[in-house]
Image: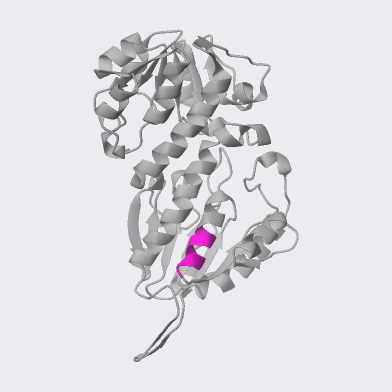
Amino acid sequence: MILGVLKEPTTEKRVSLHPEAVKALISAGNQVLIETGAGLKAFLADDLYSAVGAKIVSRIEVINQAEMIFQINPLPTNERAAAGAGKVIIGVYQPLVERELMAEIASQGLTLLSMDAIPRITRAQSMDVLSSMSTVSGYKAVLLAAASLPRFFPMLMTAAGTIAPAKVLVIGAGVAGLQAIATAKRLGGVVEAFDTRASVKEQVESLGGKFVEVPGAVEDKAAGGYAVEQSEEYKKKQSEMLEKSIIKSDVVITTALIPGRKAPILITNEMLVKMKPGAVVVDLASVNGGNCEGTVDNETVTIEGVTIIGSSALPATMPEDATKMYSKNVHNLLKLLLNGDKLNLNFEDAIIQGTCITHGGEIVYAPLK
C-alpha cells in the first residue's frame, strides 16, 4: 500500500510517522512517501527518512499518489477533494466537536480514522494518542507554571532565610493530571489534587500528592477515564471545597474535559479575585473553552493579578519525543489496520469500529449516527 506523510501547518512541529515506524512499514511491503521537510521541526531530516527507504516528494505528489494519508491536523477542504474518494486519511479530527466537518468528509467519499477516537480499552492502550499526548501536556504545564511563577517551587534554606515551597493544585487526575502531580513533586512543590473519581485517590497519593475529596460524585467506568456530568448539589459542594484549595495555591493546573461538550467552569472570576497576586493557572482544557473563566486558547492573559495560560498545543512544544509517541500510537493501529500491505478495515473489531468516523460516503461512527 502507498502511505503518504504530509508536513503539518506552521504552528505544529510534530510529524505523523517517525523513521523507525517508516522502516517497519516498508519492511512489511508498503511504499512510504514523505513530503519534503515534513519532519524538520521535529529534528527529523529528510535524509533520515530516505535512509530507511522512504521517497521524499512534493506535497501534491503525496496527496495524488498515496492511498493512505497522514497529517495530524485536519486536511483543508481543497486537499481532501484533490485526494479523491476512496482514500484513507488518519489524523486528529475531534469528531464529537467538528460534526459539520465529519459530514463534509463523508460526502467527499473519504475514509477517516481519527486518532483521538481510539476506544479507551486495555487492548488499545498502545494506540491511545490522547493518553500519550496528555503525558506531554501534564509535564510541560508544570514547567510553564514554574517559569511564570514569581516564586521558587522548592523549599530553600539559605543564608538569606527560608523560602517556603510553592503550593500546587491539580484539578483532574487523569493522565495529564498525574504527570503534572509527578512533575510538580520533582520540582519540590507541595501538591494537592482533586478529581470527581474517588478511585484515583491511591494513584494521586502514590505520587506524593494529597487528594482533595468531595463525597457524592458520580463515576462512570464507560466514560473512558473522563469526567462525567455531576448533579447541581454536587457541583455546589465541589465549588466550595475547591475554592478553599484554589485561593491558597500558587499554581493551579486544570485538566477537566467532558467529551463532545464544553469544559466545566471550575475557577470563577470570584475565585480569581481571591487568589494570590502572581499566582498561575495553566488551563489544559482550553481547547473546549477552559476550566477557568477568562481562559483564551493558546494565549496567556492576566486577570486580577493571576496569570492564566491557555494551551491545547503543548505536545507541539516538545516535538521530538511527542513525535516518537504519536508515531508509535499510529504504527500500533496500522498493525491492526494493515495486513502486510493490504487494508484490513474489519468493522467487527472494537478498535476499528470506534476509530473509523466516515466510510463509503457515510458517517459510521456510532456516537454521531
Front residue of 54/226: it is 54
Front residue of 348/37: it is 37
Q: Position of residue 98 (x, y in %)?
A: 47, 30
Q: Quadrant of residue 42?
A: top left
Q: Is residue 345 left or right of residue 318?
A: right
Q: Is residue 308 left or right of residue 344?
A: left
Write the start and end of the magenta stretch as one range. 180-187
The residue under the point 64% across, 67% down is: 212
Q: Considering only vertical position in the picture, is 342 above or below 181?
A: above
Q: Quadrant of residue 79?
A: top left
Q: Position of residue 356 (x, y in %)?
A: 56, 21
Q: Is residue 18 left or right of residue 365?
A: left
Q: State whether residue 273 appears in this view.
A: yes
Q: Position of residue 364 (x, y in %)?
A: 59, 18
Q: Main secondary structure of the magenta part?
A: helix
Q: State whether residue 285 appears in this view.
A: no
Q: Was residue 29 drawn as part of the magenta stretch in this picture?
A: no
Q: Quadrant of residue 161?
A: bottom left
Residue with the most extreme right position = 216
The C terminus - image quarter: top right
The N terminus - image quarter: top left
Q: Position of residue 263 (x, y in %)?
A: 53, 48
